Image (tube, rainbow, N blue to C red):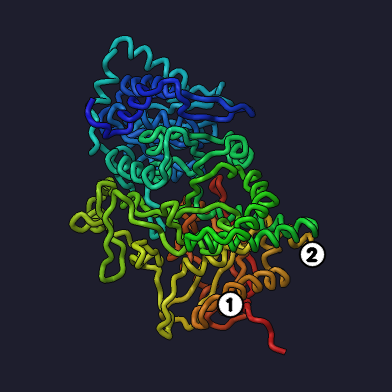
Amino acid sequence: MNDMNTFPKLLLRQFEQGPERVAMRKKDFGIWKEYTWRDSYENVRYLSLCFLSLGLKQGDKVAIIGENEPQWFWAEFAAQAVGGIMVGIYTDMVPAQVQFMFSYSNACIAVANDQEQVDKFLEIKGSLPALKKIIYWEGRGLRHYDDPLLLSYNDAVALGRAYDKNHPDAFEKCVQAGSGEDIAALYYTSGTSGTPKAGMVSHRALISSGKAFLDYNHLTSEDNLFSYLPAAWIGEGMFGTAAHLVGGVTLNFAEEPETVQQDMREIGPQVVSYGPRQWEDMARGIQVRIREAGLLNRFLYRQCEKIGYMRGALAEKGARGKWWQRILILCADLLVFFPLRENLGLRRCRIATTGSSAMSVDTFRFWSALGLRLKQVYGSTEAGFVAGHRSEEIFFETLGNVSTCAEVKISAEQEILVKGPQIFSGYYRDPAKAAEAVNNGWVKTGDAGFIDKKGHLVFLDRLKDLNTLSNGTRYAPQYIEGRLRFSPYIKDALVLGGEKRAFIAVIVIIDFANTGKWAEENHLTYTTYADLSQKEAVAELISRDIRRVNDGFQEAIKVKKFVVLHKEFDPDEEELTRTRKIRRSFMEERYRELVDAIYEGKSGLQIETPVKYRDGRQTLMKTYIKICTPFREQP
C-alpha cells in the first residue's frame, strides 16, 4: 500500500496492527459498548461498498448530520474510502440551513442520526434533486415511514456485503487509489462576517495537523479521548478524528449531550477538548455551587482556592515551589480538588485543550488553581493547526509554540500569516475568495497577533475587530468579553465602541440558570427571562462584576455603560455562529437603535426584536431596556 496519506489507509493500518484493540466506546441504555478496530474496518468496508452500489463516484459528497457516535465516523471514512468527500452538518440547524449546505456542496447522499434529522431531509427533499438516499442509523420512530429515499444503516451494510461478494477487491483498490491531496471533507467556516464558506480540506492537511497534535501532547493508543466537539467542525477533525486514526487514540462518546458529565466520570478520559464556552460554563457552575454550599464547605474551598492559585502561579513560572508549598498543595488536592475533578470526570485528564475563540486569562487561572492545566490550541479551517501549548510551556496569555507542521510570520499590519502542509485547498465553488485568503502560499488568517520573546504566538483579536476609540485608545473586544464571561452571572457579552465613540459600552446576556438561582435566594420574584433581565437588583449584580473587570483596566478602556438584553444571543437568529462565535457586525446593525441610545445618553429604550422560532414562525418581542452605568453613585 502507498504511504499512509489518507484516513482510510490509516484505518486499515490500525486494523492490521491490532484488530481486537478497542477503537471506540459508546454508551447506550446505560451500558458502555466497545467497538474494536475490526468493527470499524468492517463497518467502513461494507458501508463504502454500499455507497459504490448507490453510484457514488470520486469527488461526490456525502452529507452527515447527527451526534458524535461511531456511525458518524464510519460514514465519513466510508465515503473517503471510495473517493468521496464528507460534508458535516450541525445537528441544531433548521431545514432551510440543511438545504443550503446540502445543495451548495452538491451532495448526493445523506447520512442522518435519527428521526429528528431524517424529518429535516424529508421536509426539503423536493428542493434536493440530487439526493439519492437518506441512510439513518437510529430507527426509533421511523418504523412506519414509507419513503423510497430511506435506507436503514443495517440495510445499507447488508447492501455492501452483497456488493462485496461480486466485487471482492473493490474496497482495497479504492483505498489504495486514494491520495493525500484528495479532498477529505468540506468544513464550513464559522461565518462571523457573513455566509459561511465551504473550505476544502485534504487528507494531507488533516493528517499533518493530527500528527503535530499527537507530537505536542505525546498521545498513544493507550489514551482515551472524549469526543464532544461537533464532528461537523474542523477542530474535531484535526484533534479528534486525526488523532484517532494516526495515533490509535480511543474515541469515547456520551449517551446523550445531557449525560456528558456522568459519562466522563465513568470513562475518566486522558484527553478532553472543549470550546471556551464549555469551560466557562463549567467554571460558572462551580462558582455558583460554592456560593450555595454550607458555611464550613465554603470556608474550606476558599482556603484551598488560595493554595490553588499559588499552585497556578508556580506552574506558570515553571517552579516546583518550596517543600511546605508542595504539602499545602497536596492537602488542598486531597480535601477539595481531587473530589471536584472526579465529579467533573477530569480525574485522569492530563491533556485538556480549548480553542476556536479567545478565552479569558481568569478562566485559565481558575482551572489551573483546580489542578487542570488547560492548553490553548489555535487553528482554523483555512490554516489548520497553527500553534498550541506544550505541557511544559503553558503561559495563559499566549497560544503556545508554532506547531511542528506550520510556518508563521506576522505582516506589517500585525496579521498572522500561516504556511505549511496543513493548510486548506481553497473554498469550494469560490476560487475568488480563496485567492484573497492565500498569497504566495501564505494563508491570511484575519487574526492580529505577534510572536513574543519566548517564541510563543500571542493572539490579540480579529484584525477587523481591533478597534480605536475617538481619543485614539486601542482595544481588543474579545479580551474584554472574555474577562466579563468569567462572572457566574454573565453568559455572553458584546463590546461596543469604535472611532466615533468616546467610551466602551457592553451588551450583557445573563446566565439565566445562575441568575435565577441568585434571585430565588434573594427573594426576588420574576416570571420570564425578559422580566428577570430588567430587574434593578440584577443590574446591580452585573454592575459589581463589571466593576471587578474594570479594576484591572486602564481608565480609557473601562466599561462606562451597559445594558442587560432581554433575550439570549441565538444561532438560529444568526446572532451567533454554530460554534457560538459572535457575528459582531450583524449584531451591531441588528441592535442599532439600542447602540445609538447608549451613546446618545438616553436612560433606556423600548425595542422590538424579531424572533424566529425553530418551526419557522416569527413574532415581535417588545421590551423596555434600561441603560445602566457600572459606577457607584457618589454620596
Q: Position of residue 342 (x, y in %)?
A: 64, 44
State if disc 2 and disc 1 touch (CB < 8 Å). Answer: no
User: Sequence-wise, which precedes: disc 1 or disc 2?
Assistant: 2
Secondary element at tag 1: loop
Q: Residue shown at 32%/59% (left/top)? A: 445
Amino acid type at circle 2 is Asn
Q: Tell me the quarter of the picture where residue 448 sits.
A: bottom left
Relative to 169, is 253 above or below?
Answer: below
Query: Which of labels 1 and 2 is toward the front?
Result: 1
Q: How many marks?
A: 2
Q: Residues within 10 Å of mark 1 (few under 14, many from 20)?
A: few
Q: Tell me the quarter of the picture where residue 545 sits.
A: bottom right
Q: Residues within 10 Å of mark 2 (few under 14, many from 20)?
A: few
Real-space CA distance between mark 1 and mark 2, rounded to the nearest whole angstrom: 26 Å
Point out the image quarter for the N terminus.
Answer: top left
- Taking depth in this image into account, of 487 and 189 the one nearest to the observer is 487
Q: Residue shown at 63%/52% (left/top)? A: 330
Residue most toward the front?
323
- Reading the image, the residue beneath label 1 is 551
Relative to 337, is 585 above or below?
Answer: below
- Taking depth in this image into account, of 218 and 275 the one nearest to the observer is 218
Point out the image quarter for the C terminus.
Answer: bottom right
Q: Position of residue 46 (x, y in %)?
A: 38, 19
Q: Residue shown at 51%/80% (left/top)? A: 554
Secondary element at tag 2: loop
Residue most toward the bottom?
635
User: Which numbered dot is residue 522?
Assistant: 2
Residue 620 shows in the view = no
Q: Position of residue 19 (x, y in %)?
A: 41, 21
